[in-house]
Amino acid sequence: MKMKNIIVTGGAGFIGSNFVRYILNANKEVNIVNVDKLTYAGNLENLKGLEDNPRYHFEKVDICDKVAIEDIMKKYEIDTIINFAAESHVDRSIKDPTEFINTNIKGTQNLLDIAKKSWEIGEDSYKEGTKYIQVSTDEVYGSLNIDDDCFEETTPLNPHSPYSASKASADMLVKAYHDTYKFPACITRCSNNYGPYQFPEKFIPLIMNNCLKHKSIPVYGDGSNVRDWLYVEDHCAAIYKVLENGRFGEVYNIGGHNERTNMQIVNIIIKYLHENVDSQIDESLITHVKDRKGHDKRYGINPEKIHSELGWLPETKFEDGIVKTIKWYLDNKEWLENIVSGEYENYYNKMYKI
């Protein structure tokens, strides 16, 4: 079997790094090129142990850099791109949308243009085995009311933040390239991920870090906003299914069937830490803060399409996944502290002798 040569953009981030580890274990016939700009959320410590793997390569490159991406496509004879690279923090997008427009929209267009040029062998015809996967988010659908049915692939896009608007725009570009040029692409849209290696400005690791340091835990509004939580390894398995058998031009929703309010998440983590780690960790750490602008009330994903077409369903019950996640952060306090202190940013220099 011919080796597949895959670019994973944003492979030093939370989901990307988990996917790199997953696919290297799942398929011995792939070479992975991790293309990451190493912004604040990109952390090569997430990939410790892979540096000497002959099937893993790292390139410190911005996906907006046309020349550098073209060089990587040629150097590694790339036939697959999985685009995780994105600015993804809603609060940051509200403060300054510029980088979200540049990376999430212009970066996606750059990847599409270069891949199209590299793979095209005739009008509307591409090299066999080539594929582009755009990893997106359920936030492009907007917000659900508590009693609404879950998002489906046909749900109209209705983004409410600069972040989700930039992701919706990128999705529309990918769709347009397929519809116009028959470009071999799929789109996946996932619910909230949780698990190892998540940057601690995100909800669950933020709770963990603040609890362990006896700092206040900020909760927007009354904490009743609902999210559908998906264990990151289940997400990786779903993307791998789409990589193997997903139909070009299709969108696949990837959800965890684990809807919880923000307050439920906070209380679950506090309860576990109170009972198993430190009895001084309790609900007194919770601080309700002014609600986020344009804060979506509820997300919920219907994954029936990916289940019926590709045979995927989440395997990790939330009750199990959250305990695994809590234990991982407890076992990796040094990793967490390196990020909080900023020390993680020096890892690239150490590894690559910069």
Image (tube, grey):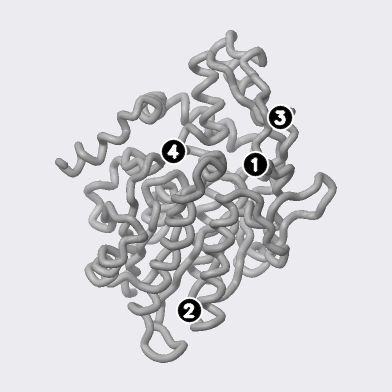
Tag 1, which secondary structure?
A: loop
Q: CA distance from mark 3 to mark 2?
A: 43 Å
Q: Which residue is mark 2?
A: 183
In this view, the mark in front (3 or 2): 3
Neighbour tally class for label 2: few under 14, some 14-19, many 20 plus, Cα within 10 Å: many
Report the Cα–Cα distance between label 2 and label 1. 36 Å
Residue 25 lies, with reference to residue 252, above or below; the image says above
Task: Indicate which disc residue 197 carries.
Answer: 4
> In this rendering, is residue 297 above or below 182?
above
**Marking on residue 171:** none
Mark toward the viewer: 4 or 1: 4
Residue at the image position 25 percent from the left and 41 percent from the top: 348
Residue at 72% x, 63% y is 155
The CA distance from mark 4 to mark 1 is: 19 Å
- Label 4 or label 3, whichever lies nearer to me, is 3
Q: How many residues crowd around disc 4 within 10 Å: few (fewer than 14), some, or many (20 or more)?
A: many
Q: Earlier in the sequence, mark 4 or mark 1?
A: 4
**Side of 335 relative to 161 (left or right):** left
Which residue in the structure is indicated by mark 3?
Answer: 221
Q: Residue 218's spot in the image, x, y percent? A: 61, 25
State which tag comes first along the sequence, 1 or 3: 3
* Residue type pointed to by label 2: Phe
Along the polypeptide, which appears first: circle 4 or circle 2? 2
Are the residues tagged 3 and 2 within 8 Å (C-beta)?
no
Secondary structure beneath dot 2 equals loop
Residues marked 4 and 1 touching at CB (< 8 Å): no
Residue 45 horizontal/vertical position (percent): 32, 38
The residue at which mark 1 appears reads as 317
Which of pointers 4 and 3 lies earlier in the amino acid sequence? 4
From this view, report whether residue 114 is shown above or below residue 150: below
Count of marks placed on residues: 4
